[in-house]
Image (tube, rainbow, N blue to C red):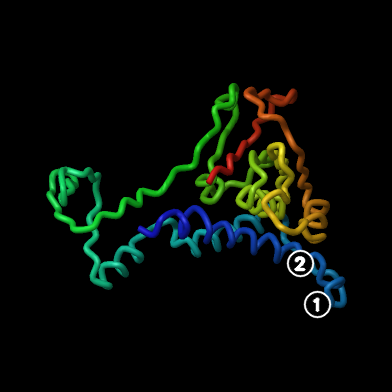
Amino acid sequence: MGGECPYVACIPGKGMLRSAHVREDARRLVELGGAAAPVALAEDEPAYRAAVRRRDALSSHRDDTDAARDIKRRGVTLIRGTGRIAGPGMIDIDGRQVGYRDLVVATGSRPAVPPIRGLDEVAVWTSDQALSAPARPASLMVLGGGAVGCELAQAYAGFGVAVTLVRGPHSLSAAKTQPWPPSWHQFCAAATLTSGSAPRSKSWKLPPTGRPVHCWTAVR
């Protein structure tokens, strides 16, 4: 109840990004005038676990119980199940007939994994896993340089993950009316984040080291 935004999209994504940015600001407290001497920060792994705890709290641990209770309190009848249009003015929900006057179909969407040969040989996340997984990967390749891809690349890089952001033939700023601000480039330089363009490849090769690589597809 509430769609993907509260659970595996906007809310947890912005939460992780905020934690990463605060961590980066803490490293620059002297430069920013917030402290007279550098402060000691926890290592990336325990800091990431703390950020995940905050992320999960913000997203209600991906539990829609409160959202369902709230919408019922507002007078909405909530029926969970698989529905189909049974005829004019009638839908069937797992054998239960429900009449309607106006029908709105709002089924939402699912993240998609591109049909790239060899992608099934590596660990692949969709954005759902990227915003709900408890573990911090050692490295991450993000396929897609749009807003979602850039946001999650920054969030993971902020906690010491070696992130490679792979975009299509257009630049990262193709969808923006203004160039990316200097802060983006500063963050990339400080957080081991690299980016590059790639042709519309249809094959995937394992790295020569044989180490697992997490591929995250940012498709929305």
Q: Quadrant of the N terminus?
A: bottom left
- Secondary structure at numbered mark 1: loop
Between 204 and 98, which is closer to the camera in this rendering?
98
Residue at the spot 62% in from the left edge and 36% down from the top edge:
215
Residue at the spot 79% in from the left edge and 52% down from the top edge:
188
- Residue 185's image quarter? bottom right
Cα distance between the residues tagged 2 and 1: 9 Å
Q: Residue 154 location, x and y as percent?
A: 69, 53
On the image, numbered disc 1 is attached to which residue?
Answer: 34
**As drawn, 56 above or below 209:** below
Crowding at dot 1, Cα within 10 Å, few <14 / some 14-19 / many 20+, comes out as: few
Crowding at dot 2, Cα within 10 Å, few <14 / some 14-19 / many 20+, comes out as: some
Q: Residue 216 location, x and y as percent?
A: 60, 40
Amino acid type assigned to the residue bearing label 2 in the image: Asp
Between 39 and 151, which is closer to the camera in this rendering?
151
**As drawn, 218 above or below 200:** below
Residue at the spot 35% in from the left edge and 48% down from the top edge:
107
- Residue 209's image quarter? top right
Amino acid type assigned to the residue bearing label 1 in the image: Gly
Residue at the spot 84% in from the left edge and 77% down from the top edge:
33
The mark that comes first in sequence, 2 or 1, is 2
Q: Residue 11 location, x and y as percent?
A: 52, 61
Which label belongs to residue 25?
2
- Secondary structure at numbered mark 2: helix
Q: Are marks 2 and 1 in contact (CB under 8 Å)?
A: yes
Q: Residue 36 location, x and y as percent?
A: 87, 77
Between 3 and 205, which is closer to the camera in this rendering?
3
Which label belongs to residue 118?
none
